[in-house]
Amino acid sequence: MTKLAGTPVGAGEALGVGWGTVLVAGAGVTGRSAAEALLAAGAEVVVTDSSPERLAALETLLEGVELVPGLTEPPAGTSLVVTSPGWQPSSPLLAAAAAAGIEVIGEVELAWRMGTELADPPVWLAVTGTNGKTTTVGMLESILHAAGADAVACGNVGLPVVDALLAGRRVLAVELSSFQLYWAPSVRPQAGALLNLAEDHLDWHGGMDAYAQAKARILTGDVAIGWLDDDLVGDLLEASPARDRIGFTLDEPEDGQLGVRDGWLVDRAFADDEALVEVAKIRPAGPPGIADALAATALARAYGVPSEAVREGLEAFEPAAHRAVLVTVDATDIKYVNDSKATNPHAAVASLRAFDNVVWIAGGLLKGASVEEMVRTEARRLRGAVLIGADRQVIADALAKHAPDVPVRSLDLADADDPMLDVVRAAQELAQAGDTVLLAPAAASMDMFNDYAHRGQAFTDAVKRLTGGR
């Protein structure tokens, strides 16, 4: 059996399971990691992808793997398909596999099944939600490190779960998207937290109910944790089959809950009534950051982390880039804030509510989400709006209906030499002293940019050029 360099001996031995011939669908990061893990387990591995270039990049990295571009049916003898998370069940290859009675799972499910073969499986502490996942899992990792745990953040945050498993990490702080959860039917984390629910990825799931049910899989382990201030989450938490159901709230907590009282995070679920950390020391500041900190705290406490480590971990945590980052304040007292990670309306609402007078930069790919309620409730904050991207007219129509007095610039940037420079310049023209120019697009970025980080960096660079690099 081939072993990966650095694979713990115990893990390598446990992975010696009869996997047969496994087809890996997708040659991206998770596909490569799944193929490596399956090779280590002694499987015969075939990898397919629509991009010959992505497949070619694996030739020197994966010895003993058959690389086949553009498969629409599993090869004869395939016992299992491991798909990259973004592939929809209706894609020809996966539909053909299902029709042939071949099970289709994701890399997260693969990691779970491999972990159950270990004599001493790692602990899974898992996080999902429409927004706040990466911040929460980062906070959780920081708390676990403060407690001295051999922990790593993995999953949708970047590091594939199967890589963390093969590295022998003892505690996995796992960020899971709705796609990953859909393809992970057996995963039962020791503790799982659902942060919030709002319209997102409806084009992939086919509707809000299917999206919510995928997210609800996070609540099927030993301890289910949910945000009680979100009615949808509260209902799913109440229906959870978990042994223990723990709620968190931005209000004062009741028995069995975590919440906020007199400027402190308070635990009444894993302690009688214990103040853990001052709200003022939590970053990012504001209600979304506080809610994320409560979820991370609940997960850590479910694992038995002491209060001192919660405080140290949260105080040491630094938010990732492109999440409500103040870029600069210019000479006319206009703030420029980069929240490119606000890739859906729910996230954009949280971002808008942090400011009173906003010139809002929005638009991109809405992925089937509605913007009507967001615009209706937040219109009073808007000093102006600059709209970009494929679905900018949808937002423009909502603004015309609910905020007809707000000046709007809708920019067609197809031929622009430097699109974001034009965007920031238009926002500057609408802003007045004391206003905030806020990039909170409420939409995905791939119509104009590589990803949200590319979009956020383009905004940051344009702001610095137009404000003289202050």
Image (spheres, rainbow, N blue to C red):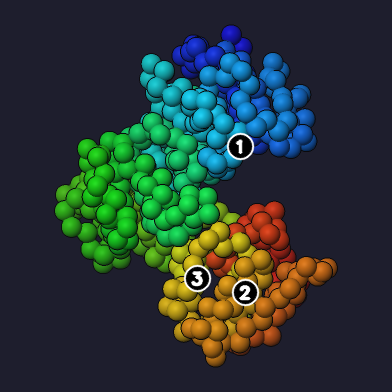
Name the amino acid, label 3: Val
User: Mark 1 or mark 3, which has the lower sequence index?
Assistant: 1
SS class, disc 1? helix
Identify the residue position indicated by label 1 in the image.
92
Disc marking residue 371: 3
If the image is split into quadrants, where does the N terminus sit? top right
If the image is split into quadrants, where does the C terminus sit? bottom right
Identify the residue position indicated by label 2 in the image.
393
Residues at circles 2 and 3 in contact by the CB criterion of under 8 Å: no
Q: Residue at x 18, y 57 (%)?
A: 254
Q: CA distance from mark 1 to mark 2?
A: 32 Å
Q: Residue at x 54, y 66 (%)?
A: 442
User: Mark 2 or mark 3, which has the lower sequence index?
Assistant: 3
Q: CA distance from mark 2 to mark 3?
A: 11 Å
Q: Is residue 48 above or below residue 349?
A: above
Q: Say whether residue 147 is left or right of residue 316.
A: left
Name the amino acid, label 1: Pro
SS class, disc 2? helix
Q: Residue at x 62, y 83 (%)?
A: 408
Of badges 1 and 3, nearer the viewer stands 1
Give neighbour class at mark 3: few <14, some 14-19, many 20+ (Cα, 10 Å). Answer: many
Tell me where residue 77 sits by quadrant: top right
Please provide percent x and percent y for residue 347: 48, 63
SS class, disc 3? loop
